Amino acid sequence: MGYGSYSHAAHAAFTRAREEVPLQRVFKQERCHPLMDPHGVKWRESRDSEAHSKSLGIVFALDVTGSMGSIPELLARRRLPDFMKSLMDVGIPDPQVLFMAVGDANSDHAPLQVGQFESSERQMDQWLTSSYLEGGGGTPGTESYELGMYFAARHTDLDCWRKRKHRGYFFMTGDERPYGYVSRKQVASLIGDTLDEDLPVRQVVEELQVGFEPFFLIPDMARRRNCERDWRELLGDRVICMEDPSDTVDVASSLVGLCEGAISDLDALARHLEKGGLERARRGAVIRALTSFAATLGRDGTPQPRLEDEQLPTNDYNSGHRRIPGPRRSPLDER
């Protein structure tokens, strides 16, 4: 999938028109939409075409339990067009977006829902608003995030990776920990795969990283206490702690821009966000959320230390800086 053209003006118009519409008229589903049922799905495909010769597959795996449903609502009412425009403004011409909805497989009726990769604004929006916002959640402190990662790792096929060895992007929003393994029973009942045994979540993350740049976005500082440590053990600096859920779109698009090299550093990012009309307080919040990860890319704007072209000191010799040449003296000589 991923055919069709994109119009930011059209996208912005129909999202703006629903800003005051009751939520139940935006997300009408009262159960999993049949076309988003992952059972029996072999592949969700992101394909090149004549109109999109450099497709870039992007997955939004959205936690739809409890208060996390505010992020899908924000995307549908206002911010999804901003995500697309931000990417295109920095020269990423062919993003193709797939939406997943993730809940808890131990209690929810629809713990995993999966759309298609799309390029056009209408189709993209239809998959997003066809998600069933169940709003449940089960075991305190955990959700079935690992099922979303498993599906992306084993049931997506991206031309950006297949043809160009260029990874797509996987953004998961959440405020709880994942389960420690992918249950073979849950995979059989929800997806239809047969596994010989449960899969450790670390293995699933390793598989996901083959074709995707994965990130876990925590919505605010209050909820980071619930899950940050566990996710950092899995993803390290790819865990992004935001200050407000409204920053989701700007953080995600900025991560793509930084990783693609379309945005050179955080100073350039600040200018890009300002040009896009983002208010100063929110620009600061986005920059703060991304500083640690940008440093791993060498894109935080901090000057890199320069090492001298000489042997590093060993044993008990002084290290670091040049010193005035002279005989090395013992402290006893000073007495």
Image (cartoon, helix red, strand yellow):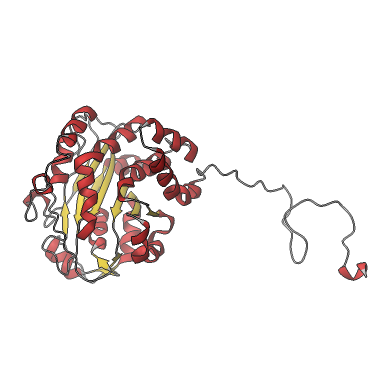
Q: Residue at x 33, y 64 (%)?
A: 203
- Measured as percent of width and height from the top left, residue 55 is found at 28, 36
Q: Quadrant of residue 146?
A: bottom left
Classify the position of the C terminus by image quarter: bottom right
Q: Nearer the viewer, residue 241 or 234?
A: 241
98 and 311: which is toward the camera = 98
Residue 189 lies, in percent from the top left, at: 12, 65
Q: Is the residue 197 above or below the residue 239 in the image?
A: below
> In this view of the protein, can residue 96 be seen by the observer?
yes
For the point 28% across and 31% down, the residue is 53
Left or right: 132 with respect to 247? left
Quarter occupied by the N terminus: top left
From what the image shows, is residue 273 above or below residue 58? Answer: above
Q: Residue at x 20, y 67 (%)?
A: 195
Of residue 18 and residue 136, the one placed in the foreground of this image is 18
Q: Is residue 30 left or right of residue 44?
A: left
Q: Depth check: 52 or 302 in front?
A: 302
Toward which corner of the image does residue 39 lie, by quadrant? bottom left
Residue 51 visible to the viewer: no
Q: Work out whether 206 lies above or below 245.
A: below
Residue pictured at 68% horizontal, 48% vertical: 307
- Mark count: 0
Residue 37 left/right relative to 137:
left
Q: Is residue 194 above or below residue 133?
A: below
Give the image location of residue 101, x and y in percent: 19, 54
